[in-house]
Image (tube, helix red, strand yellow):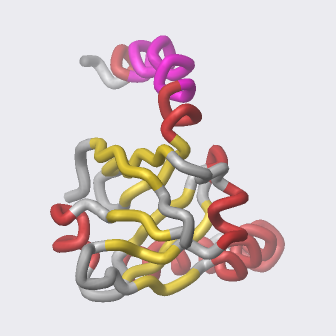
Amino acid sequence: MFMGQYDYAVDAKGRLNFPAKFRDGMGETFIVTRWLDHCLAAFPPEEFEKVAQRIAEKGMVKGRNVSRMLYSSAVEVTPDKQGRIQLPAKLREYANLDHDVSVIGNRNFAEIWNTQDWEARQAESDEDFTAAMEDLDF
C-alpha cells in the first residue's frame, strides 16, 4: 500500500528521487503517466493493467479519449542506483514539475505533484474531505 508524502526536487536533467518505500512496492520497472488534476500517477505494472481493463470495459465511446490520453503519455521508468526516475519533459510540463515536487501515496499507486499545487489542492479539499467522511458515516 502506498501512503505518506515525500518532498523532493526535480533536478536540471528531469530526474526525481522516488521514495524507497514506494520503489519497493512498484517493482523494478513501473509506469508513470498523466493523471487527474494536473498531476502524474505512478503505477506498478499490474495496477496499470487494472486501470486499462476498467477503461476497456467502458466501451469504445467512453473509453476512447481516456485511453488515448493515458497511453500516449505513459512511460516505463526504472530507478537508477540513487533511486531517481527520469521524467520526460512533456510530463513535467503537464504537471508543472519545475522544482519542488511532492510524491504522495494513494493506496495502490502514487501521485507526483508540484508541491505548491498539492498544498493548494489540500487547502481546497479540507471541506470536501469533511463532507465525504460524514457521508461515509465517520
Please indicate whether residue 24 sits to the left or right of residue 55 in the image: left
In the drawing, does residue 87 fall left or right of residue 42? Answer: right
Q: Is residue 70 above or below residue 128?
A: below
Query: Going by the image, does 68 lie left or right of 116?
Result: right
Viewer-nearest residue: 124 or 16: 16
| Quarter in which the N terminus is drawn | bottom left
Q: Residue at x 71, y 57 (%)?
A: 94
Write down the region rendered in magenta: 120-132
Q: Is residue 133 magenta?
A: no
**Does the magenta segment cover residue 129?**
yes
Residue 56, given in percent of the width and then of the height, sits at: 63, 79
Q: Quadrant of residue 78?
A: bottom left
Is 92 situated above or below 25? above
Foreground of the two, 56 or 8 = 8
Q: Nearer the viewer, residue 105 or 128?
A: 105
Quarter of the image containing the C terminus?
top left
Toward which corner of the image does residue 40 lie, by quadrant? bottom right
Q: How many marks?
A: 0
Give how far across and how far down residue 67 sits, in percent. 70, 76
Residue 46 is situated, as x and y percent measured from the top left of the image, at 35, 82
Q: Residue 21: give x, y in percent of width and height.
A: 16, 62
Main secondary structure of the magenta stretch: helix
Instruction: Please say if 95 is above or below 73.
Output: above
The residue positioned 48% from the left and 12% from the top of the image is 127
- Considering every residue shown, the one lying at the far front of the view is 12
Q: Kindly identify the residue that appears in the image at 71 percent across and 59 percent down.
A: 93
Residue 114 is left or right of residue 4, and the answer is: right
